[in-house]
Amino acid sequence: MSTQSNSAPLIQLRDLSKIYRTGEVEVKAVRSVNLDVRCREFVAIMGASGSGKSTLMNILGCLDRPTEGSYVLDGAAVAGLNRKQLAVLRNRKLGFVFQGFNLLARTSSLENVELPMFYTHPLISLHERRQRAVGALEKVGLGNRLGQHPSQLSCGQQQRIAIARALVNRPELVLADEPTGNLDTRTSIEIMGLFQDLNDSGITIVMVTHELDVAAYCKRMVVMRDGQVISDTPTENRRFAPQELAALDQAQKRAQLA
Amino acid sequence: MLLARYLWTFLLRPALTALIALRALRRNKLRSTLTALGIIIGVASVVAMVAVGNGAQARIESQVAALGQNLLSVFAGSRRSGGVNTGLGSASTITLADANAIAREVTDVVAVSPEVSSTAQAIANGRNWSTTITGESPDYLKIRDWKLASGAMFTEREVRAAAKVAIIGSKTANELFGPLNPVGQAVRVKNIPFVIIGLLESKGAGMGGQNQDDRIIIPYTTAMKRLTGEKYLRSINLQVGSAARMEAAQQQITSLLRQRHRLTAEKDDDFNIFNQKEIADTVGSISRIITLLLGAIAGISLLVGGIGIMNIMLVSVTERTREIGIRIAVGAQPGDIRLQFLIEAITLSLLGGLIGVLAGVGASRLVGMVADFKAVVSTGSILLAFGVSSVIGIFFGFYPASKAAGLDPIEALRYE
């Protein structure tokens, strides 16, 4: 049940399927997937577009419900829950990081980060909300950008705010959907470095990506094709952000000299 | 702990949600203003229209009341000669004996004034003026609820003596004497000299628009003997003891007069009874209908304002699909989203209602200044307009809010 326990997995998928019906056509987006994710893992779910990885991600994120099979998140069966109960799960146990950041426009960084706490039962005091939001922003290195609006910040900074928002309610699991998809190489490495730091500090992360480069920062790679898991292996030659950044600096210097 | 949860659920959550809603409204100032304008106009017109209607009603009712209290007038019937109908009071059917019989036999009648009337030239103070001369009894002022500005009414004794005394209307007095006090002065009518013993208070235009202050009142005996020389009356003015007895008194008078005039069952009345209460009721119900009509028309504009809110809320939900998706993703429950948009709609309509009430009161004041009656703003219409506007906010906000709450988070997050 608890996050400390290593015996029970945080995520447990059994024969999980998702079937979409559009008129006559039946699309099996996810087929009989079995997957366990334990606490403190850092998993990359890879696959081409149409492989079912996004659908799987939506189910893991309690945004969508499976057609068949079971999904147990932190000891709770998700499959039978209604919209309201799913909302409570998302609020308490999950943090989302999206490709397009999905921050509220014309709203300060601080208020963006405070947003999930607004929907938490029971009441979190204004003081604690403020404290936790500032803490989360400091953790992602934006402690000095509390009052700025997303439009005043770079893409990398915006994604950091989104990560702070994902962390602020102390979730069991952070789900990232192509978090570096809109970022340049250097910023991507920086964001992956942030994820690695967070993972080292004990946060479980599941990430969807179609780039091998990005997946290489994770500890475990799950590859999907046609809705099925075709391989599930620990990452070989795992990348680490500090080394990659240093290598990038060197490469740039060489390019300038040449 | 339980209290905190209770507060959170029932007070703090809506309060915080209201803050979000207000912020969203402030971001779209122009749009919010224009949307609220629909409600503002609706509420303002309800308040103003009902006020104008009430004002007009009050004015008409006061005019009817100015006729006197519980007044019945018996007019002689109309006469036809060669196809020409000569109108009420022209036929010679009512006599002094009729008046006396009514006073004697109809117990509900508390005051009687037989009336004869003619138009004549009044000469006084070196001027002359054509005016209405009416013969009445001393009860007349009581019946018409009329007071003297100065002097005294002639007495029963002066009536019996057919004394040459007169009460003068303020308009006639002004024409003949100017600023001079007419009481004690002489006035000649058809070469008969009268002493003016009283001056009537001004009463203004009557129901038909004729000036009630342009007249001379003399004892009916004097009028019959010396002026008209007729033994028939134009009418009998009567006062009934209470409003509740008006109907009964009218029926008794009708049967009494039919009997006295020896009218068989198949014959029509040769007289007409004018019932002030009936007129007042008719006028009152007509003006109430007009008020209702004005209010209904204004209510329609309030409805249109409500549809405007619904329209803009639907646009707002579509525009903010992504925001809704984000809120749902981080754990907002459908109820939270519904509440947020509902509060936005209610805020718009309540704010519009508030401004509308102020504008309506202002408009009523303006109408009151222009028209010759006061527009009466009623608390009821304010409460009604305000209540209706908040109900409209809830009603027309509910569909867009439910639409927002029912959005699929995945599609909402993908929405561009």
Image (cartoon, coloured by chain):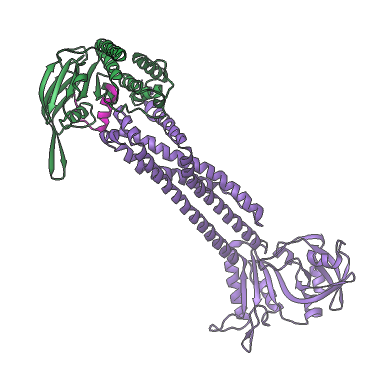
Q: Is residue A8 visible?
A: yes
Q: Is residue B29 above or below residue B254?
A: above
* Letter of the chain in purple: B
Looking at the rendered image, the quarter that the N terminus of chain A falls into is: top left
Frontmost residue, A167 versus A74: A167
Frontmost residue, A77 versus B34: B34
Drawing shade for chain A: green
Frontmost residue, A198 versus A35: A198
Quadrant in the rendering for residue A37: top left
Frontmost residue, B63 versus B236: B63
- Residue drawn at (23%, 26%), measured in percent from left and top? A61
For residue A89: magenta?
yes
Q: How many marks?
A: 0
- Residue drawn at (88%, 65%), measured in percent from left and top? B184
Q: Is residue B169 visible?
A: no
Residues in magenta, as a range: A75-92
* Residue sitting farthest toward the bottom: B82
* Residue sitting farthest toward the right: B126
- Residue A36: x and y in percent read 14, 20
Left or right, residue B309 beside residue B413: right
Looking at the rendered image, the quarter that the C terminus of chain A falls into is: top left
For residue B239: magenta?
no
Q: Is residue A18 above or below residue A2?
A: below
Q: Is residue B31 above or below residue B146?
A: above
- Residue drawn at (48%, 44%), measured in percent from left and top? B34
Q: Is residue A25 above or below residue A245?
A: below
- Residue B23: x and y in percent read 44, 32
- Residue B99: x and y in percent read 69, 75
Left or right, residue B56 beside residue B28: right
Left or right, residue B214 beside residue A15: right
